[in-house]
Image (spheres, rainbow, N blue to C red):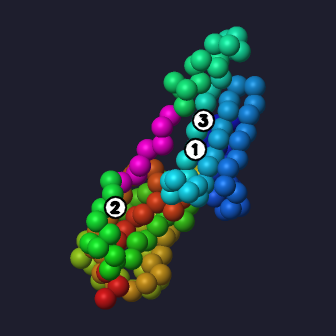
Amino acid sequence: MDLKDIQNLIKFVAKSGASEVKLETEDIKITIKTGSDDSKGETTYIQQIPAMPVQQQMQAQPQQAPAPVEAQPAKPAEADSKYVTIKSPIIGTFYRRPSPDKPVFVEVGDTIKEGDVLCVIEAMKLFNEIENEIAGKIVKVLVDDSSPVEFDQPLFLVDPS
């Protein structure tokens, strides 16, 4: 199973509304959890199973399972409550400009209207333009250029007033 298959599986689970999916083959074990009560968002555990006796596998599993990583530190709710968060609709690589030699789509402080292109997300060799759905002013860009993004990850903060 390669990275693209895993990304497609994560997208499928996120869209399906399932709370937990486990997939186990001879050499890999994947658990995807979404929307649980104790944590928001999705958690994916991927574990490569080496060829060793079952008893040693049982002892090694807790060390190999990665802990979920929080994308951003918690912020005061009052400070961001007046802003609208624009989130990524897909998994891919975030780009602020249409090509390396072109200017960025939007900067902090720019006034935007509905339908404006905010960024491009590359997924599986396809470049998807992400359009704005509300009018307002860009307050903050939350993702660095050429960074990988997850489904539903915040990309921009917009002041709709």
> Which residue was labeled with disc 2?
142
Q: Residues within 10 Å of mark 3 (few under 14, many from 20)?
A: some
Amino acid type, callout 2: Leu
Amino acid type, callout 1: Thr
Name the foreground residue: 31 vs 10. Answer: 31
Please, which residue is most extreme toward the left here? 109
Residue at 68% from the left image edge and 30% from the top image edge: 28
Query: Does residue 161 appear to the left or right of 21 in the view shown?
Result: left
> Mark 2 or mark 3, which is nearer to you?
3
> Which residue was labeled with disc 1?
44
Residue at 45% from the left image edge and 50% from the top image edge: 148
> Which residue was labeled with disc 3?
46
Query: Percent position (x, y) of residue 144?
Result: 33, 55
Q: Give the Cα distance between marks 2 and 1.
A: 22 Å
The disc placed on residue 19 is none
Query: Percent position (x, y) of residue 128?
Result: 54, 65
Amino acid type, callout 3: Ile
Circle 3: element type: strand
